[in-house]
Image (spheres, rainbow, N blue to C red):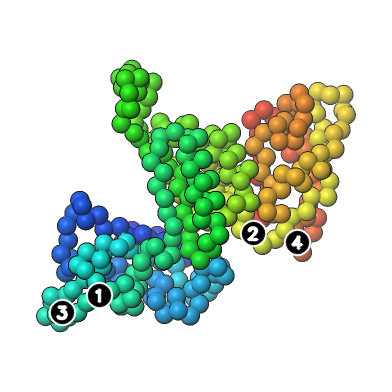
Amino acid sequence: EEIHLFLGDHPGEFVVLDVVYERDKHEMSSEQQLSVLQLLSSTFDATMVTQEDVDSWFHLPTLTLGELQNRGKNILLLINDHFVIGGGSGLVSSSSSNEGLCYDFDHVAREFGCHRNGNFMKNKWHDTDRAHTLLQRNETFLEGACNDCHVFMNSQFVLTPQPPRNIRDALGLLFGAKSLRPVSLARDLYRKDVLEAFIRDNAENKWNIVLLDFVDLCPQLVRFLIGLNSPKHMTIQHASVSPKNNGGAIIDVTKRINTLMKRNCCLYLLDFTEDLELISVMEGTLKLDAQFDGEDPLNFVIPFGRNTEYLLCDV
């Protein structure tokens, strides 16, 4: 119900709801499973993607958010195999109205609008509490599945607390050098030279769904990910740096700036000195002359220091 209210308040959003039945933890009868499917269907009703939609226009390789909004659809309901595999070929209803009726995946999709998750999304839990291991595994996951554009790719950037592996880990927990709290782990990941630099430097990869558990720690990164989808190309005609303490000498960084453009639509500077290859220049002013497709030229004057980040995109 909360998700339904959220979508009502934010009609421009699109939600993929993956409902996982964990049979090894909670056993449900066929009737209970059917009740869950009926609840999902009745709650989201006309706003959910139906099997008829999938058959006619909901094709992921060409689908756009604009098309979803124009058709009034804002949620895709997915279920895992245990919903229909548990009883053999499918759920078997014992109710008086549907006694003996078998619900396989096709029947469930057509009657309830709940689709097999494996048909629409690839998803991998990386199960690590180490930031750099998490980044490497995400890169491997995306490389292994990058040729499949027929499903959503869910890249999970979520660290998972791990039990002590050895005496050193146990001592770290005991004396406070190590923590099992997710927010403590996030400090190692949500740094601009770790998570943000990784995604920025790999922006040409086919990022699709990016799962983050502390989005409030990286608002610029969220804007950057959204900006990567912009259809408007951006051109940097000229860029120069005026160092704060360099006798007024101006440094032309036009060529360097253009090498930092991502998907021809986003410029994301995390460290001006390093990104622009400014030897010993820690403070100054960056002047940009830019233009988005079909729009008037724009001029930007950006003062920067040691900790300045800057994002330019059509968002």
Vertical placement of 61 versus 194: above or below? below
Earlier in the chain: of badge 2 and badge 4, it is: 2
Circle 3 or circle 4, nearest the eye? 3
Residue 208 place in picture, x, y as percent: 53, 56
Disc 4 is placed on an element classified as loop
Earlier in the chain: of badge 1 and badge 4, it is: 1
The amino acid at mark 1 is Tyr
Earlier in the chain: of badge 3 and badge 4, it is: 3
The residue that label 4 is drawn on is: 293
The residue that label 2 is drawn on is: 230
Does the rendering let one see residue 9? Answer: no
- Tell me the tag on residue 103: 1
Residue visible at 66% across and 44% down? 268
Earlier in the chain: of badge 3 and badge 2, it is: 3
Earlier in the chain: of badge 1 and badge 2, it is: 1
Residue visible at 45% across and 79% down? 55
The amino acid at mark 3 is Gly
Q: CA distance from mark 3 to mark 4?
A: 60 Å
- Tell me the tag on residue 100: 3
Instruction: Tell me whether the residue at label 1 lies in contact with that at label 2, contact meaning CB atoms closer than 8 angstroms.
Output: no
Q: CA distance from mark 2 to mark 4?
A: 11 Å
Q: Is residue 194 left or right of residue 158?
A: right
Disc 2 is placed on an element classified as loop
